[in-house]
Structures are given as C-alpha cells and as structure tokens.
Amino acid sequence: MEFERLMAGMQAAAAQFPGHMGGFLIPPEQAEQSCYRMLFAFDTEAHLQDWMQSQERQRWHRRIADVTLGGAATRVLTGLETWFALPAARTKSPPPRWKMALVTWLGIFPLVLLLSRTIGALLAPFLWPALVVLVVTALVVTAMTWIVMPTLVRVFAGWLYPPSLESELNPTPTAEKL
C-alpha cells in the first residue's frame, strides 16, 4: 500500500539524521479506523528538533499528504512513556522485554536504594511509613522519567536497538488514510 511505502521511506530518511534510534509505524487498531501513528525515537531533544525542522521531513510530509485525508498531528513523548511500544508496530521491533526490564531495573535499583536511605531516612521520624514510601516513589518516578531512562536508553541504544539485517517493513492490509 502506498501510504505504508511512503512512511517506510520517511523512516529511512529519518534514520540518516544524527541521534535517530528507530521508529514504529502503528496501523489503526481496528480495520474500520483510519488513523495511523508514527513514532520517531531520537536520543536528544536537539536531534529530534533537527529532524522535525528539516526540509527532508517537510518533503516527506508533502508526499504523504497526497495519499491521506486531513492533517498530521504531532505529539512529543519523553522518558518512560516511550517504553510502551504498541504490539502492532510495523517498521522496527521494540527491544525484547527482558532488555527493557533489565535497563529499567538498572535505573530503579540505585535510585530506590539512594532515595530510601537518604530522603526516606530523613522523613521516617516525621511521617507514617506509607507517606515515606509515597514520597520516595514519587521521586523515583520523576527521576526515571526525565533523567535516568533517557540517559540509560542513550547509553544502551546499540544494545537495545541493534541494526537489523532484514527488511523492517512488514505491510499488512489495513486502512490507507490517516
């Protein structure tokens, strides 16, 4: 289908930009729906902006507009939310779950240990244990989302997303319009 071919071309173009870590073409969840989603992963905000503002991306958007209805919407995701890859992804497989679990654990373990021994210990004499855990886990989630996971994904990118030797486009019959 032409739309999926164009999206694969756009993904290949994005792969030539610095910091590109992969991407997913997510077809509609149900055949009667017509909204596709495209996820582009970049290692830094600056690299993402280079792609987003590039003439190359604009050219691909114009080509894709010829085979779609309506305009495209953009949403930038960061941190842990990008780990929830949808199973219907078509252009690049997400890392195996065991790799995602291991890298997540590498971030969570030292944070929980450090924050429970420091902040948790400071708050323990003044708060109920459940409130201490509430504060510590809120700090862990915050640090994981905006600091630790983006750093770990960047550090382990080659291991998490190794280059594929086979074609990464597996088209399936689905609706053609955005």
Image (cartoon, grey):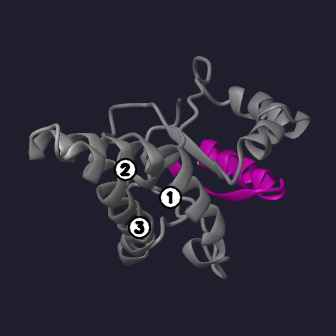
- For the record, the magenta segment spans 2-26
Percent position (x, y) of residue 98?
36, 77
Q: In this image, 125 relative to 156: left or right?
A: left
Q: In this image, 30 relative to 18: left or right?
A: left
Which residue is located at x 67 percent, y 82 percent?
Answer: 165
Decide: is 52 above or below 96: above
The residue labelled by disc 2 is: 140
Farthest-out residue, right: 55
Is residue 85 among what the camera can see? no
- The amino acid at mark 2 is Val
Decide: is 99 above or below 127: below
- The amino acid at mark 1 is Arg
Percent position (x, y) of residue 122?
29, 47
Which residue is located at x 48 percent, y 70 percent?
Answer: 95
The residue labelled by disc 1 is: 90
Q: Earlier in the sequence, mark 3 or mark 2?
A: 3
Q: Earlier in the sequence, mark 1 or mark 3?
A: 1
Label 1 and label 3: CA atoms lie apart by: 35 Å
Percent position (x, y) of residue 177?
53, 31
